Amino acid sequence: MDNILSLLIGLIFLAGMATPLLYRIWQKNTGLYLSVIPLIIFAVLIAELLQLAPRESSLLETSMGFLPGMEFAFRIDGLSLIFGLLISGIGVLILLHASYYMAKYDHQASFYTYLMFFMGAMIGMVFSDNLLVLFIFWEITSVASFFLIGFDHHAEKSRQAALQALLITGFGGLCLFFAVIITGNITGTYVISELLEQSIHLGNHPHYYLILTLTILAAITKSAQFPFHFWLPGAMQAPTPVSAYLHSATMVNAGIFLLMRIYPIMGGTMMWKYSLMLTGGITMFLGAFFSMGQRDFKRILAFTTISALGTMTLLVGIDTPDSLKAALIFFIVHGLYKGGLFMIAGIIDKSTGTRDIYDLHGLYKKMPLTTVVTLLALISMAGLPPMLGFLGKELIYEAKMQLPDVSWLLLPLGVGANIMMVAISITVFYELFIPDRKRKPIELKYKEKELPLRFTVGPILLAVVGLFLGLSPKFLETPVDNGLFFMGNQSAELSLSLWHGFNDVLILSIFTVLSGVLVFFIRRPVTRLIGKIITWLDRLHLPTLFTQLINKYVKSAAKNTNLLQHGYHRFYLLTFFLMVIALMGIQIFRITDIHLPELTPSPIKIHVALLLLVTACAVVFAVFAKSRLSAILTMGVVGYGIAMLYLYYGAVDLAITQFLAETVLMVLFVMVIYYLPEFAILSSKKSRLRDGIISIGVGVFITLIVLKAKFLNLETPVSEFFVANAYTEAHGRNIRNVILVDFRALDTMGELTVLTLAAAGVYSLFRFQIKILKKKKTGTDEPRQDDNKKMHV
Amino acid sequence: MNNIILEKIARLFLRVIAVMSVLLLLRGHNSPGGGFIAGIVLATGFIYYGIIFGSDRIQTIIYFNTRIWMGIGLGLVLIAAVMPVFAGHEPLTGLWYIGEWPLVGTMHLGTPLIFDTGIFIGVTGLILSIIITIMEVLKWNT
């Protein structure tokens, strides 16, 4: 049973990779069939949930992994189960929804690929028990979301939004990477379960502030918190199912998940509290406030998402058992209603062709089912009974009120944000569904009954689940309790129920609702005011500023690159050789303890001496050669001479390679020699003198260091290991080859890659030149037939 | 350039060299040779052929584009690198199968052979790619 889960997560990725093939078979039904995988995961997770003991977590270990020390191990506790259930459950509905919504898009196969990768990465991330694995899945979500947001890649806006999202979340990902590495170095383990069991807390470590800053940066960039919130409304360019998924259960909630996951390791300090409360509080209010000024249904929802994420960050930052509980519950609440609302936006968009809520009205009569479902979701968003949203909001108020020192600030902010939420909920419902006599009724492209079930089932199910959980929240107690236990190692008073009794929280709620209704009635001046504020703030339009920043960065990078990559080959060589001299000089003067062995000069071998003489003569001749051809030929003599030297000393492989390489080089030279400009000495005497000195310097230093290295044994030479193990371990008698393909295979792999890149570079450098030349010669784009070709061959 | 003797030689030479290079590749693990050397040897054969017949002819006899050959080489290397992971080892660990074969007797077969073949194909491909590109430029530059 347990291992099924790890297999299933792998299966998602496999299915994602196979989608291009599967799409050919299944065509429009791809989404329908693909949704079976998350459905099975959902069922397995439900089974896990039923088995979940209140104070225990289970661990699925596998031997597979990215690298040793990065094994896939899946940790199942309350926190990961809650996230996993929402991700897989909503994933099923999104796939169903998308299979109809996306039916007319191009490149659907790649859409499903990205979506499956995204889903797999999210599920992998919440269950992973290793910080490094978590980081890798985290990055996969960033990359997959880049492709999903920019799916309409022919639109400039889409591409920009996708790039912005990628840059910001990628920056956060880097921060997370550093934080993870530092954490691992300090604690000696990357395994989350071990960190939790040893109850390590980094709070007293000198590097704590660095780690925390990095982690919080990662979380707030991913979760679109102030001041990084601006990428989320931009991400609205994505197709609606993607937005629904990104906002409800995945992507932006990953930051919240991260905060909750690492809470026991580094949470609860003053910096944690204040930084999260600050950014969360600002985001919560800003999001709700700006949502009133929007016209596009999806943008409204995006801003409410920002607000909800702010709320969650704030709650994690308040750091009391109650607030953590509220954060977890609110995550569920938000996932349920936001996923539903986005899908409803998709439905309305599909049936009417617009998402502008002020253009629509009176949809109630034509879309009764949608109306009911929207009503339920909006009630949850506004935090009214009997939906789960009410419970969430009550808990939030309770958590905020318990905080004596800052509740004077947080409570008004929170109440303000909620008032806006209530108002926007009513506004959306009123504008969409209540008929306006003065305007003519909206014509629908598709009647509600004509829409297939898979398109509409998502919001319906989510609304029903929200209602059900609101009425009987007892079902949530076990996972939430379990999650809290592992988050804080502390147990909160946990009894969830809709009715809390008549207390100050309820009074606050009533006040919120009444004010919300009031704001709704004066919505026109309010929206106008907010619109004005938005236009005023647009002078500080963050997305534009961000783009400018990136452009400036690219420009300065180009400047610096040009400084180093000036394009003069001779100066590259100069730099290179000077660096070599400097590095070798350091080594020569640093290492002094050399014990010269008793030297018994070996007899001079006459043939070796002759060979060296010839080679040396060739070098001198090459330097002073008067024509290019003779210079090249003498260089060839040098090369062959060295190869012969290899042969004498038994390095057959090296000799062969040297011979062959030399030959190929010769051929190349001879090929191009006709086309080179005339041989001339262009450099001044001074620079030639300089070059000569440098080259002699390199030679001298290399000779010195080789001589030195011969008498130096800093470490046991690794060659002995190769000699001893080449046949026993690697089944080869040719040690050089065994080193190349086995002991040092990674190096060889790298070298082959570099060489391939070089070849690709040569090709791409000349590709256009060949085209242009062809055009010039033949006068047309297409080269003429053979008769023309023969002339040039 | 139409020289029937040279053409005959080039054809024969290419075949001999191809066989020779495969031999070098296969014996590389125990005696001098190996993928890299074999790759250069094969490339020299093709270069000789190309000098006589022109770069287009190389392109036709190698069937795939050189860049695809480079890709195949890299792909084989990657396969050899990743295969041990599925057997529960670290990447690039050699997996060996030692068995008795008819005619040849005991033979050691392992992922390093795949790796070496990848290098062989990759090196041949990349040298040919560079040479063909340069020959193309020269051809149109006259």
Image (tube, coloured by chain):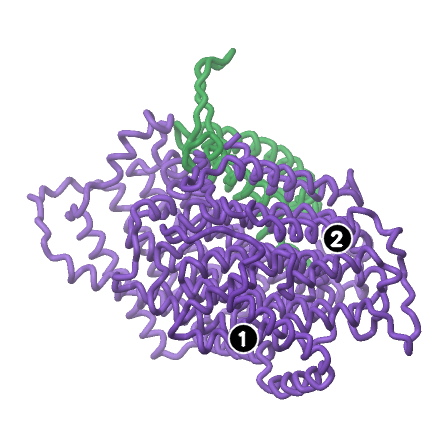
Chain colours: A purple, B green
- Per the image, the residue denoted by label 2 is A107
Callout 1: SS: helix
Disc assigned to residue A550: 1
Q: Position of residue A295 (x, y in %)?
A: 74, 75
Does label 2 or label 1 sit earlier along the sequence?
A: 2
Q: Position of residue A128 (x, y in %)?
A: 46, 45
> Pointers 2 and 1 in contact (CB under 8 A)?
no
Q: Is residue A167 visible?
A: no
Relative horizontal placement of residue A256, taking residue A728 as reference (left or right): right
| Viewer-side residue, A388 vs A132 | A388
Residue at coordinates 80% horizontally, 63% vertically from top-left?
A349
| Viewer-side residue, A471 vs A431 | A471
Crowding near pointer 2: few (<14 within 10 Å), some, many (20+)? few
User: Are the residues under badges 2 and 1 in a single subunit?
Assistant: yes
Q: Position of residue B120 (x, y in %)?
A: 52, 38
On screen, residue A664 above or below A313: above
Give the amino acid type for the residue marked by disc 2 in the picture.
His
Which image quarter is the C terminus of chain B in?
bottom right
Q: Position of residue A510 (x, y in %)?
A: 60, 70
Q: CA distance from mark 2 to mark 1?
A: 30 Å
Residue at coordinates 16% horizontally, 48% vertically from top-left?
A712
Q: Is residue B72 visible?
A: yes
> On what subunit does the disc labeled 2 rest?
A
- Quarter-wise, where is residue B49 in the image? top right
